[in-house]
Amino acid sequence: MSSIVKPLKVVLEHFPKRTFTVFHPYEALKLPERSRGGIQLDMEKCTGCGVCAYICPNVAIELVTRGEKRYPKLDYGRCCFCALCVDYCPRKALKTTPVHELAEFSRAELEYPPERLAQPPQITKPKPAPRRKIVSIKKIDQRGVSHH
Ligand code: SF4
Ligand code: SF4
């Protein structure tokens, strides 16, 4: 009996509360200030010491040469957003941003050379939601879709 009553009690407790989900990508979730999203590089501060590449547990960072200096190149295909690179950078040249919409259509596009990593990640504005037409099961049946 308690296996029925307990879940029912939880449902009834939460039923009048506000919803916690959003209709993404048409609605944006306001993330906490310290949430860890995309990483931004300050090329002026970076000395090319390589600590970020050394500390990264996923081998997501490699150093690439630009002129006489070296800078980190980051592969988001490997990154788990642990922010160890940010914490260990002796020059505070890396910082996390709240931008989490980093999806791309290919693995190659997930690789951020230093110049791209230095750009502030863009927050895309939510698009207006499409009108969703709710089709009743009865209408679907009329179109010939069978239910087994
Ligand atoms: S980002 Fe920081 S840890 Fe990485 S190479 Fe530059 S200075 Fe060193
Ligand atoms: S956030 Fe973590 S996994 Fe991603 S590049 Fe930095 S150290 Fe590597």
Image (cartoon, rainbow, N blue to C red):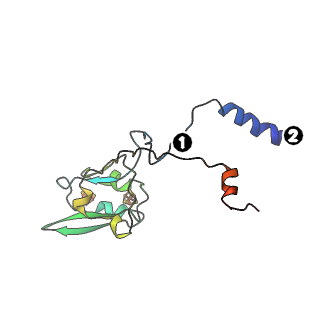
Q: Indicate the quadrant where residue 21 lies.
A: top right
> Outermost residue toward the front?
142
Image spot of residue 126 (x, y percent): 39, 45
Q: Is mark 1 within 8 Å of ligand 2?
A: no
Q: Which residue is mark 1?
A: 21
Q: Position of residue 25 (x, y in %)?
A: 44, 48
Disc 2 secondary structure class = loop
What is the three-letter code of the residue carrying label 1? Thr
Q: Position of residue 143 (x, y in %)?
A: 65, 59
Q: Quick one: 23 or 44, which is closer to the camera? A: 23
Q: Residue at x 45, y 41 (%)?
A: 29
Quarter holding the N terminus is top right
Which part of the image, by quadrant, shows the C terminus? bottom right
Mark in front: 1 vs 2: 1
Q: Position of residue 47 (x, y in %)?
A: 19, 59
State the residue position of label 2: 1
Q: Is residue 133 left or right of residue 95?
A: right
Identify whether 34 is placed above or below 117: above
